[in-house]
Amino acid sequence: MAAVTSRPASLPAVALLVYPATLLLGSLFSILSPTARPSRDSYTQPTPPLAPSLASDLHLSENPVNYFARKNNVFNIYFVKIGWLWTTAAFLSLLFFSPLYSSSRPQSASQQETRFRRTLQALLRYVLITTAWYLSTQWFFGPAIIDRGFVATGGKCERAFEEVGKMGLGGGNPTDLEVLFTAATCKAAGGAWRGGHDISGHVLMLVLATGLLAFEAVGASAPAFLSRFGLSADAGRDRKTSDADSNLPVEPVETSSFARTWTLRLVWGVIGLGWWMLFMTAIWFHTWLEKWSGLLIALSSVYTVYILPRRLDSLRDVIGLPGV
């Protein structure tokens, strides 16, 4: 029998270039656009952060021209500020409704084992990306990595010491208080988080979230895609057609059910809105270096989880690849 090579559908590594391209386009627009320039000038007099858990992500003028430059725009409040909740909901919907991980059809023991392994590996990839987000923006044995970096580069919480005393957190010297502050506690105490290198938590979170969902969504769509050509998904290795019965059967195209269709719409909707808010962040908020340092952390995490296993068998055996 002739040999057939079938590879799971997956995003190429070059797809990651969409993120630096987005930041570059947004940064150029912020420099060249007469509309964006007044808001960018407000960096000289930053206001307290909108999302303190993301390390003082927004610096806005009092009357921004563009709706997306307003700290209270609906997308920032109900999407970005709870972005990981949307990411988690979209990811779990893939696990529940994708034929790659679940099926209503009778299954052999080997098929059940394969699906169980794939589900565990998908959850592990989610945990790894979530850990990168959490340690960077929420907690790292105390203040998050972003907050620690801000203080280490000379940042501090200004005009807050009197408020701290009222909250019962006083007693130490100002230097100690500055080190103990996170962006969240600084805002709660009425201070302003200023002076250091403020890595963009918005950029970091949005790149992690959209990268996670895009790679998982494309991988989860592989069975339906390959079934149209009569192929089975495998680990990217050459297989003979006579071995097809040993592969995990692919759900037929009819699995594009109501639930699966709306799951993919939800996932790609979150990805699309996440990209748009990344573009808005690139235009209206942060300095060039702060945006790109957030991008570097996020891309390093996405590359390690989704690209590096393609080259390292030992890593792929542990965390797998979407669609494999």
Image (cartoon, grey):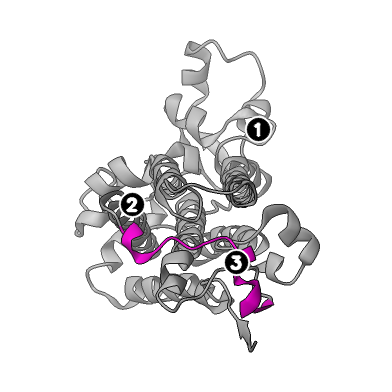
Which amino acid does the dot numbered 2 rest on? Thr
Q: Nearer the viewer, residue 296 or 307?
A: 307
Please tell me whether mark 3 sits on a helix, a strand or a loop: helix
10 Å crowding of disc 2: few (<14), some (14-19), many (20+): many
Residue range in magenta is: 238-256
From the image, tell me which residue sits under label 3.
Answer: 245
Query: Could you tell which of marks 1 and 3 lies nearer the N-terminus?
Result: 1
Q: Is residue 194 visible?
A: yes
Residue extending furthest right? 314
Q: Which mark is residue 263?
A: 2
In the rendered image, which quarter contains the C terminus?
bottom right
Which amino acid does the dot numbered 3 rest on? Asp
**Residue drawn at the location 58% of the way across and 30% of the way down:** 181
**Residue drawn at the location 62% of the way across and 34% of the way down:** 143
Query: Could you tell which of marks 3 and 2 lies nearer the N-terminus?
Result: 3
User: In this rendering, is residue 272 above or below 94?
Assistant: below
**Residue drawn at the location 46% of the way across and 73% of the way down:** 226
Q: State the image coordinates of residue 102 (x, y, percent, origin top left).
A: 47, 47
- Residue 32, image quadrant: bottom left
10 Å crowding of disc 1: few (<14), some (14-19), many (20+): some
Q: Nearer the viewer, residue 45 or 68?
A: 68
Disc 2 from disc 1: Cα separation: 44 Å
10 Å crowding of disc 3: few (<14), some (14-19), many (20+): few
Magenta segment includes 18: no
Please tell me whether mark 2 sits on a helix, a strand or a loop: helix
Q: Is residue 284 visible?
A: no
Disc 3 from disc 2: Cα separation: 29 Å
In the rendered image, which quarter contains the N terminus?
bottom right
Residue extending furthest bottom? 2
Q: State the image coordinates of residue 221 (x, y, percent, origin top left).
A: 44, 64
Magenta segment includes 250: yes
